[in-house]
């Protein structure tokens, strides 16, 4: 018979882990009573250990779901007794004082202002001395609220108890013998939901505190009859608390008490007394309650299971997943995606990017050395003069070209080109980390970025040095082949045309903004006059200062005599337009030069066509840099990245973390939840079925005997 309770207790805890649906609840024994009625003492007497929180200040603030598991002593005769908090994962606790401390901490974690919480604490106790039982210890009913307790405490406790004393639970109503049963809040609450006492057992504690005849009268239950009756107990420890043999002493005191008063409580009286009797009574009642729930619960589980099976079929087409498979798939997809993206980092693409960066640098060099040079027009003029041969061009231009080439080759190409590619990789990883499914896994995304950055940090310095080293020869000399020259020339023309296009677009934009070309022209004229006046004034001031004259200059505030036709923004636009047109002038001149016969000729025209020469240099720099960046940075990164995924994202995850990771993704969580629910229901259904069959087999035998 005990088999049934035990099995159903197991089933009960599985069902509780599925959901809190009332239909899926198997009965448990709920212990209620007012504060100090002796509730804790009764529970401890049943368990045979002191383990409940003690103290005057409302120490039970959360329900304790106590599951007692009868576990026979091991073969060596060792009686192993221990407790477990399944949701805390602390493992087996053999020291009951430790269990008591843990329970106290868990209870005190509920803020005093809230006083009680509905969130139950799960505790399992394994021992050869306990029967298979599930008990729920609830906060005691408040009789007199103390000053420091919230007003609503009384109601909160009542409401919590009301929630638990619903069907199919069995109510253990604890009342002290020395308090009139008429005043017992436990009995009052139970009568509301179970008027006949069909599922209420009365426990009368402190039997030693009243005269035996009075105690016996209470147990007879004549005044407040309960179908399941009353059991009288004495659970007073007369030894100092915490001592090992407390339980034994308690038992002895109880036995002595009831045997001293045989005439009132003896077998002939048919009254139920003693903790052992209470234990047996609880087992019987729970067993028969479980047995009668069997049919209903089987039907309820069947319905839930059908629903879960149907949902699983419809939503997931019966496809099973595991957290492990999700992690593995996610990582494979990550690697595949990474591989896909790395095609953007082929050598020609890198070379192209580097060339663009170097082209910009060349433009800066040209601007700095040539376009702002007062002799610049001269260069164009001698370029157009067929009488001037390359070998008799002024040495000025030869030095100029050397300076330009040197500015470009010594501009930190190693560092800049390496950073450019590293930045590209960083952006790539960032975009992967911010896409599905990593949007659900912020921690993993962060780790992904962390180790990518780490690989890059490791490589960037080395690569930059290596590149810088390899382009070193170009700092001294750049040999230009006719072939290089022709390519460079076309590229330079392309670049200039693009630059001209950009400047024109800017001017056009400004023209549109200020309201047409006539307006822009007059704006520009105005700004030019302003600037000339300013320059003029400055010159005069300088002259005055150097001539030491005392002539005080009329502080003509022409700047401030704003022409109100124009807004400051328009004046700024006009200044920009002037700059762009100046630049356009130079660019067009130079473009014409680049297209001229002289520049077409070949490398010997380098001094006259520095744009082409710099383009060739930039091309060589890009080519060499890309070679070494490829070996030192990209290859290394592409090799290490997938390996780091394995070692840093997966291998150091334990089972729990894998579950956590998978469940971060809501789609996967729903899938896993439904699958688990279905599995558990199936398992429960199988156990229930076998119990039902066992009982079917057992019943005809019973009738025969
Ligand atoms: P709870 O607040 O309902 O959990 O009550 P406790 O179990 O903490 O008991 C309250 C007080 O009553 C404690 O001081 C116990 O020692 C005492 N007590 C409990 N059971 C008995 C008993 O059977 N006889 C006597 N004399 N005192 C008891």
Image (spheres, grey):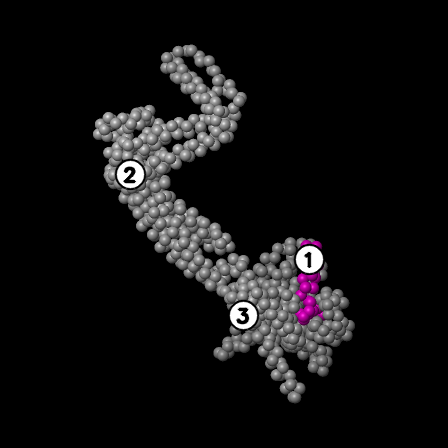
| Residue 390 circle label | none
Q: Which residues are magenta?
A: 150-179
> Is 244 placed left or right of 280 in the picture?
left
Residue at position x 39%, y 14% from top? 544
Please identify the quadrant where the C terminus is shown.
bottom right
Q: Which residue is mark 3?
A: 82
The residue carrying pointer 3 sits among few (fewer than 14), some (14 to 19) or many (20 or more) residues within 10 Å by Cα, namely: some
Instruction: Give percent across and percent down for residue 702.
Output: 65, 85
Q: Residue 52's image quarter?
A: bottom right
Give the number of the mark in front: 2 or 1: 2
Cα distance in 3D space between marks 3 and 2:
89 Å
Q: Nearer the viewer, residue 293 or 465?
A: 465
Cα distance in 3D space between marks 2 and 1:
93 Å
Q: Nearer the viewer, residue 91 or 561?
A: 561
Mark 2 and mark 1 lie on one chain; the one further toward the N terminus is 1
Please identify the quadrant where the N terminus is shown.
bottom right
Instruction: Give percent across and percent down for residue 543.
Output: 38, 15
Q: Mark 1 CB in 8 Å range of ligand 1?
A: no
Mark 1 and mark 3 lie on one chain; the one further toward the N terminus is 3
Q: Is residue 64 above or below residue 627?
A: below
Taking the magenta stretch, the answer to whether it contains residue 378 is no
Instruction: Give percent across and percent down for residue 493.
Output: 34, 36
Mark 3 and mark 2 lie on one chain; the one further toward the N terminus is 3
| Residue 486 circle label | 2
Q: Which residue is mark 1?
A: 153
The residue carrying pointer 2 sits among few (fewer than 14), some (14 to 19) or many (20 or more) residues within 10 Å by Cα, namely: some
> Is 198 placed left or right of 62 in the picture?
right
Q: In the rendered image, is residue 399 in sight?
A: no
């Amino acid at each position: 018979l005990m088999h049934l309770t035990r099995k159903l207790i197991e089933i009960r805890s599985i069902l509780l882990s599925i959901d809190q649906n009332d239909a899926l609840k198997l009965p448990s024994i709920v212990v209620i009573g007012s504060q100090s009625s002796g509730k804790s003492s009764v529970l401890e007497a049943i368990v045979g250990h002191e383990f409940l929180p003690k103290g005057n200040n409302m120490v039970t603030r959360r329900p304790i779901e106590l599951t007692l598991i009868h576990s026979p002593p091991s073969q060596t005769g060792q009686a192993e007794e221990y407790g477990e908090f399944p949701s805390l994962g602390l493992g087996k606790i053999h020291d009951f004082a430790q269990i008591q401390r843990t329970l106290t901490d868990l209870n005190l974690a509920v803020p005093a202002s809230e006083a009680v919480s509905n969130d139950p604490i799960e505790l399992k106790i394994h021992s050869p001395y306990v029967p298979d039982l599930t008990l729920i210890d609830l906060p005691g009913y408040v009789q007199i609220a103390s000053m420091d307790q919230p007003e609503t405490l009384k109601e909160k406790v009542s409401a919590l108890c009301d929630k638990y004393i619903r069907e199919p639970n069995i109510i253990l109503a604890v009342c002290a013998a020395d308090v009139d049963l008429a005043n017992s809040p436990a009995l009052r609450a139970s009568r509301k939901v179970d008027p006949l006492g069909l599922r209420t057992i009365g426990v009368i504690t402190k039997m030693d505190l009243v005269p035996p005849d009075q105690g016996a009268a209470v147990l007879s239950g004549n005044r407040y009859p309960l179908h399941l009756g009353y059991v009288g107990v004495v659970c007073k420890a007369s030894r100092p608390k915490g001592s090992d043999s407390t339980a034994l002493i308690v038992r002895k005191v109880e036995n002595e008490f009831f045997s001293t008063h045989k005439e009132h409580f003896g077998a002939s009286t048919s009254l139920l007394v003693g903790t052992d009797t209470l234990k047996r009574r609880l087992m019987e009642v729970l067993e028969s309650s479980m047995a009668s729930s069997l049919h209903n619960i089987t039907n309820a589980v069947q319905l839930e299971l059908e629903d879960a099976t149907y949902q699983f079929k419809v939503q997931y087409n019966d496809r099973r997943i595991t957290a492990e498979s999700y992690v593995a798939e996610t990582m494979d997809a990550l690697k595949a995606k990474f591989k896909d993206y790395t095609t953007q980092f082929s050598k020609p693409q890198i070379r192209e990017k580097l060339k663009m960066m170097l082209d910009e640098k060349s433009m800066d060099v040209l601007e700095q050395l040539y376009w702002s040079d007062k002799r610049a027009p001269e260069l164009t003029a001698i370029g157009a003069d067929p009488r001037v041969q390359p070998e008799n061009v002024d040495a000025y231009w030869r030095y100029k070209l050397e300076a330009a080439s040197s500015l470009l080759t010594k501009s930190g190409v190693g560092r800049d080109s390496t950073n450019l590619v590293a930045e590209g990789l960083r952006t790539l990883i960032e975009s992967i980390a911010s896409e599905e499914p990593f949007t659900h896994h912020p921690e993993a995304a962060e780790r992904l970025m962390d180790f990518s950055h780490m690989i890059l940090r490791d490589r960037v310095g080395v690569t930059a040095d290596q590149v810088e080293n390899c382009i070193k020869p170009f700092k001294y000399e750049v040999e230009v082949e006719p072939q290089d020259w022709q390519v460079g020339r076309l590229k330079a023309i392309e670049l200039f045309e693009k630059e001209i296009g950009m400047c024109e677009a800017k001017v056009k934009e400004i023209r549109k903004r200020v309201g047409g070309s006539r307006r822009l022209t007059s704006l520009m004229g105005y700004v030019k006059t302003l600037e000339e006046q300013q320059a003029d004034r400055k010159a005069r001031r300088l002259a005055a200062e150097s001539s030491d004259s005392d002539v005080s200059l009329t502080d003509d505030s022409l700047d401030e005599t704003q022409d109100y036709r124009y807004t400051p923004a328009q004046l700024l636009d006009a200044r920009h337009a002037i700059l762009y047109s100046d630049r356009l002038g130079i660019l067009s001149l130079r473009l014409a030069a680049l297209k001229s016969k002289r520049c077409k000729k070949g490398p010997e025209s380098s001094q006259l066509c520095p744009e082409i020469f710099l383009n060739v240099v930039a091309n060589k720099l890009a080519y060499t840099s890309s070679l070494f960046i490829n070996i030192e940075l990209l290859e290394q990164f592409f090799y290490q990245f997938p390996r780091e995924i394995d070692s840093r994202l997966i291998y150091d995850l334990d089972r729990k973390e894998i579950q956590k990771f998978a469940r971060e993704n809501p789609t996967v969580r729903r899938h896993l939840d439904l699958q688990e629910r279905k599995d558990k229901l199936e398992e429960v259904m199988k156990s229930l079925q076998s119990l039902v069959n066992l009982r079917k087999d057992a019943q005809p035998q019973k009738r025969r005997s």
